Amino acid sequence: MRHPVIDLRSDTLTRPTEAMRQAMARAEVGDDVYGEDPAVRALEERVAGLFGHEAALFTPTGSMANVLAVGSLVRPGQEVICESSAHIARAELGAHATIGGVTMRTWTGQRGRLDLPAVRRMFAPDMGPFFVPTAAVSVENTHNFAGGAVLPIEDLRDLREWADGVGAGVHLDGARLWNAHVATGTPLVEYGAIATVLAVCLSKGLGAPVGSLMVGGRDAVDEARVRRKRMGGGMRQAGILAAGGLHALDHHVDRLAEDHEHARLLAEACGLDPAEVDTNIVVVERSDATEFVTRAGEEGVRVSVVGPTTVRMVTHLDVSRADAERAAAVLARL
């Protein structure tokens, strides 16, 4: 008997559960561009409160949330400093430059870690019309291309203290911040406290079909609401989507621990130390990466190439324990 394909390419592949679909179908809606959708407003208020900020803005994508968040801190012609494999630098198609006129410089950290001494050396104050000034530092938690690595909260607190001293903003790309919260037990409000502005995603580990949020101060979010409309992101009866996010917050956060456990199974099958897998992403270095992905696919396990010699696999809501064990057996054999 041929088994169903196990798709480990990304946690964005999750499909809404039947209970989530029912919640979406029942959603009370209004016109969100007019600010009249009750489900969207409830989601924005709830997420802002979880992170201890004044306001939040629902966006269709994580990339848009990041562009709006970074743009609230960094004006055209200014720069943001980030790690060299950060999502905003590597996987958002140059949106920050093409839309926001933002430039970037990067440091390289082991497993995506923050290198505060490097950031201090790179920081450029406003020195008049000769150099690009640094307006913000961006950090990503968990770090996608570092294998879902969690950035220690102590490092982030040190960054915020330094940034406050030099007048720089801190942007937190928290697309998978829920995973960091579950893996470490660090309260969401403590992650919120280190960020001037942050972005969080609902359509990855939490399993909603669409949506992210930019979270920050009231003025920054009000400005972002205008920019969202200008970018084509003003949605009308978006409460149907927001209801999926509200359901996910109620039912899909704590269960992320299962995904982390399944990821460690895959890591062990690939000859990695499972103790070094922080959350739900496993990155494997293979000189035959493309061939390996093809062979795994032929065996019913989909994984992805994210670099010339790098294979990535991601556990998620639609991967059961039995699926993870079967995928581990295939990967071990290959």
Image (cartoon, rainbow, N blue to C red):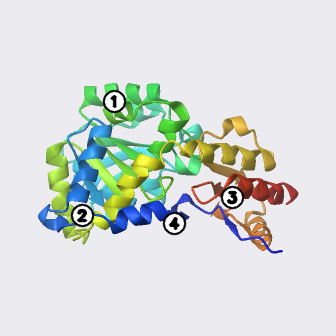
Nearer-N-terminus badge (1/2)? 2
Q: Is 69 on the left or on the right of 290, as rendered?
A: left
How far apart are the two marked residues, 4 and 2, measured between alpha carbons? Answer: 22 Å
Residue 329 vs 293, above or below: the answer is above
Quarter location, residue 202: bottom left
Q: Position of residue 86 (x, y in %)?
A: 48, 50
The three-letter amino acid code for the residue at tag 3 is Val
Q: Earlier in the sequence, mark 3 or mark 2?
A: 2
Label 4 crowding class (10 Å Cα cut-off): few <14, some 14-19, many 20+? some
**Which x, y percent locates residue 124?**
31, 38
Which mark is drawn over residue 311? Answer: 3
Residue 158 position within the rendered picture, expressed as x and y whole percent measured from the top left: 39, 25
Q: Secondary structure at mark 3?
A: strand
Q: Secondary structure at mark 2?
A: loop
Counting from the top left corner in percent of width and height, residue 161 is at: 32, 25
| Residue on which disc 1 sits | 160
Q: Splitting the image into 4 quarters, where does residue 289 fall?
A: bottom right
Circles 4 and 2 in contact, beta carbons < 8 Å: no
- Name the disc covering residue 28, or none: 2
Q: Which element type, helix, strand or loop, lies under badge 1?
A: helix
| Contact? badges 3 and 2 (CB < 8 Å) | no
The reply, left or right, for residue 261 in relation to residue 132 is right
Badge 3: residue crowd in 10 Å (few <14, some 14–19, many ≥20):
many
| Residue at image coords 78%, 69% | 291
Give yes or no for contact between labels 1 and 4 (Cβ–Cβ under 8 Å): no
Decide which of tag 3 and tag 1 comes sooner along the chain. 1
Question: Measured along the vertical axis of the image, is residue 209 above or below residue 108?
Answer: below
| Residue 58 location, quadrant | bottom left
Residue at disc 4, secondary structure: loop
Q: Nearer the viewer, mark 1 or mark 4?
A: 4
| Residue tagged 4 | 15
- How many residues crowd around disc 2 within 10 Å: few (fewer than 14), some, or many (20 or more)? some
